[in-house]
Image (cartoon, rainbow, N blue to C red):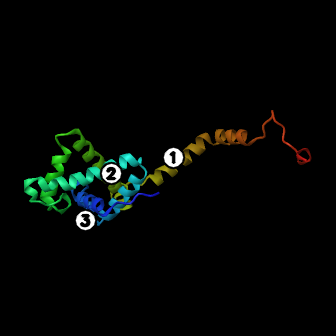
Amino acid sequence: MTYQHSQPTRRVLESLVPVICPPEAMELGLGADIVDHVALTMSSVPPLFRRGLVLGLATYDLTAMAWPPARGRRAHQLPPDLAERWWERWHHGLTPVQRELAKAVAQLLKFGCYEHPVMLERLGYTPAAWIDQVKRRRLQVYGDDIRKAEAAVLAPDPLRPPIRKKELG
């Protein structure tokens, strides 16, 4: 079963992308992709933990209504300056639950942002070239050992002779 965000959860996460991620994420139009990546990540966490994240995001969104500067608006409806201030209130919140939720949500969004191919390219992160280089070097240095070990693994077991078709009946 694959997890998918509910509309309220998606709205809250999309409103947090410009608050938590670098400005390039919005400039490049990556917000929806980042939130989709968060959904993929959340589908791999235990259901109870996932439920806690979703309930925490709902609490974050709804409790903004009681904050005087929000004037009865939910967190996802706040203008950018108030959205940042509201996020900071949670990020440095009074309770450990607030702070840990903020940390978890920030990690999910940042992971989604920096795993995006466009961001990886902008950062110049190209691990494939390095992996190929290391692979070639290791094969040069350890190639003989690898082939010997491979042959030993694939060789017939000397203590158990192979069964012939006649013997099977």
- Pointer 1: what residue? 134
Query: Alpha-carbon distance for marks 3 and 2?
Result: 20 Å
Query: Alpha-carbon distance for marks 1 and 3?
Result: 35 Å
Q: Position of residue 149 (x, y in %)?
A: 68, 39
Mark 1 / mark 3, whichever is N-terminal: 3
Badge 1 local density, few (<14 within 10 Å), some, or many (20+)? few
Mark 3 / mark 2, whichever is N-terminal: 3
- Pointer 2: what residue? 108
Q: Position of residue 72 (x, y in %)?
A: 11, 59
Give residue 159's mark: none
- Pointer 3: what residue? 27
Q: Which amino acid type is shown beneath numbered disc 3? A: Glu
Horizontal relation, residue 25 to residue 136: left or right: left
Identify the element where label 1 is drawn. helix
Q: Position of residue 119 (x, y in %)?
A: 34, 59
Mark 2 / mark 1, whichever is N-terminal: 2
Q: Nearer the viewer, mark 2 or mark 1?
A: 2
Q: Position of residue 115 (x, y in %)?
A: 37, 55
Identify the element where label 2 is drawn. helix
Give the camera-side residue of 21 and 151.
21
Look at the numbered discs 3 and 2 and tell me whether their residues touch, using CB distance below 8 Å.
no
Q: Which amino acid type is shown beneath numbered disc 1? A: Val
* Residue at the farthest top position: 159
Query: Alpha-carbon distance for marks 2 and 1?
Result: 30 Å
